C-alpha cells in the first residue's frame, strides 16, 4: 500500500540546490515559529544531499516535523515547489525560499487571520528587505529597509505592472492552489508572479500590515557563484526575456479570442512601468542639475 501523507495545518516548502550558506538559517526560521502545526518539506533539487539531510535531521531532533525530498533531476523551481507541496496534506501552504527568513509570529498571525476570514484565498504581510554581502563565503547583512510597506491592499491591476510581494510573505489556501493546478512548471522564472496573478483572477488576497517576513537579497556575487544570488538580481536578463514572453503570450491569447482580459492589463502595466521609470529618470536629472548649479 502507498505510504500515507503527513497532515498539518501548514505545509512549508523550501527549495534548495547547493546553497549550504543559507539552509541553516531557513531551518532556524522555521524552528522559531510560535505556530507549530506544520510540516517543513525541504526539496533538494538535484544538488548535493549532504547539507539538506543534515538540516532536516537537525530539525527533527529539535521537535519539528520535517521531510526531505531528493530530486534526481532539476527541471525548475516550480516543479520543485509542486513536488514538495504534494508530499503533505494541509489547509495552508507557503514557500520559504532557502535564503529567506521569518519573524517568529509569521505563521501564528497569518494562520489566525485566514482561520477567521474565510473569503480571502491567501494573506500577505509586509517584508523587510535585507541586503547581504556574500564575498566572504557567508551572508553578511549590509543594510535593512522596508520592501513593501507602502502597500494598502493587493490589487490585480497593480500586480500587472510587477509583483508586489515575495513568496516568503504569502500564506495561501490549498484549495486555491489545487483549483489552479499548482505552479506553472513551464516557467523558469516569474512562476510566483504568474501564480499570484492567477489567484487574484479567482478571488482576493488579503494584506496583514505587519512586517513579519524577511526578503534577503545579494546584489552581487563572486565570479562563478551565480547560484548564490537571487534570480531578480543575477538573473535580470532571463527575467526580462520571460517577462516579455509571458505578457505577449497572454495578450496574444486575448486578441485571438477577441476579448479584453488579463493580457490588456499586463500590457497597460508594462506601459505604466515604462512611463514611471522615465519620469523617475527625468526627476533624477533635474535634481542633479539643480544641485550642480545652486542659486547665488
Image (cartoon, rainbow, N blue to C red):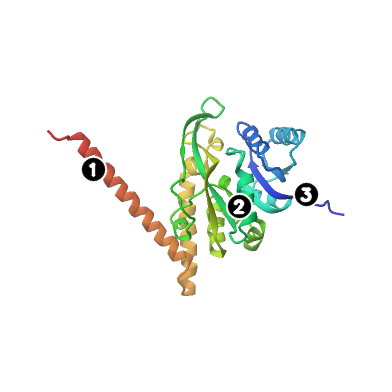
Closer to the camera, 203 or 275?
203
Give the answer, above or below, for where 284 lies relative to 180.
above
Q: Residue at x 48, y 49 (%)?
A: 239
- Mark 2 and mark 3 residues within 8 Å of each other at the beta carbon: no
For the view shown, which residue lies furthest in the front direction? 116
Looking at the image, tell me whether mark 2 or mark 1 is earlier in sequence order: 2
**Mark 2 sits on what residue?**
113
Q: Nearer the viewer, residue 64 or 81?
A: 64
Q: Which tag is nearer the camera, tag 2 or tag 1?
A: 2
**Horizontal and vertical percent for residue 7?**
76, 51
* Residue 6 badge: 3
The residue located at (23%, 43%) in the rendering is 286
Apparent side of residue 228 relative to residue 287 in the rendered image (left or right)? right
191 with respect to 69 (left or right): left
Report the side of 6 relative to 106 (left or right): right
Q: CA distance from mark 2 to mark 3?
A: 24 Å
Q: Residue at x 64, y 40 (%)?
A: 16
| Mark 2 crowd level (few <14, some 14–19, many ≥20, 10 Å Cα) | some
Q: Residue at x 77, y 33 (%)?
A: 61
Please say whether residue 76 is visible from this viewpoint.
Answer: no
Pointers 1 and 3 in contact (C-beta within 8 Å): no
Q: Helix or strand or loop: what does disc 3 sit on?
A: loop
Q: Position of residue 264 (x, y in %)?
A: 43, 65
Label 1 element class: helix
Residue at the limit of the structure toward the bottom, as seen here:
258
Residue 286: mark in rendering = 1
Residue 132 shown left or right of residue 182 in the figure: left
- Dot 2 and dot 1 residues touching (CB under 8 Å): no
In which image quadrant can residue 41 be found? top right
Q: Quadrant of the C terminus?
A: top left
In which image quadrant can residue 168 be found? top right
Q: Earlier in the sequence, mark 2 or mark 3?
A: 3
Amino acid at each position: 500500500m502507498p505510504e500515507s501523507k503527513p497532515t498539518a495545518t501548514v505545509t512549508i516548502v523550501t527549495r534548495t540546490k547547493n546553497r549550504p550558506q543559507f539552509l541553516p538559517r531557513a531551518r532556524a526560521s522555521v524552528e522559531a515559529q510560535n505556530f507549530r502545526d506544520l510540516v517543513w518539506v525541504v526539496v533538494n533539487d538535484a544538488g548535493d544531499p549532504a547539507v539538506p539531510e543534515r538540516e532536516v535531521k537537525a530539525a527533527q531532533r529539535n521537535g519539528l516535523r520535517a521531510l526531505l525530498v531528493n530530486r534526481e533531476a532539476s527541471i525548475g523551481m516550480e516543479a520543485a515547489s509542486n513536488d514538495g507541496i504534494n508530499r503533505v496534506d494541509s489547509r495552508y501552504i507557503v514557500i520559504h525560499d532557502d535564503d529567506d527568513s521569518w519573524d517568529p509570529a509569521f505563521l501564528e498571525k497569518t494562520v489566525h487571520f485566514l482561520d477567521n476570514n474565510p473569503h480571502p484565498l491567501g494573506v500577505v504581510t509586509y517584508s523587510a528587505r535585507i541586503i547581504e554581502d556574500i564575498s566572504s563565503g557567508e551572508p553578511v547583512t549590509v543594510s535593512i529597509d522596508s520592501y513593501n510597506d507602502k502597500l494598502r491592499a493587493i490589487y490585480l491591476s497593480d500586480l500587472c505592472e510587477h509583483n508586489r510581494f515575495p513568496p516568503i510573505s504569502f500564506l495561501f489556501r490549498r484549495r486555491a492552489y489545487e483549483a489552479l493546478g499548482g505552479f506553472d512548471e513551464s516557467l523558469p522564472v516569474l512562476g510566483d508572479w504568474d501564480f499570484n496573478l492567477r489567484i487574484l483572477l479567482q478571488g482576493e488576497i488579503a494584506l496583514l500590515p505587519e512586517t513579519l517576513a524577511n526578503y534577503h537579497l545579494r546584489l552581487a556575487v563572486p565570479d562563478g557563484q551565480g547560484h548564490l544570488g537571487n534570480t531578480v538580481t543575477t538573473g535580470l536578463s532571463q527575467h526580462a526575456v520571460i517577462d516579455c514572453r509571458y505578457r505577449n503570450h497572454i495578450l496574444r491569447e486575448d486578441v485571438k479570442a477577441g476579448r479584453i482580459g488579463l493580457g490588456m492589463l499586463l500590457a497597460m502595466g508594462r506601459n505604466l512601468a515604462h512611463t514611471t521609470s522615465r519620469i523617475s529618470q527625468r526627476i533624477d536629472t533635474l535634481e542633479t542639475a539643480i544641485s550642480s548649479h545652486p542659486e547665488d
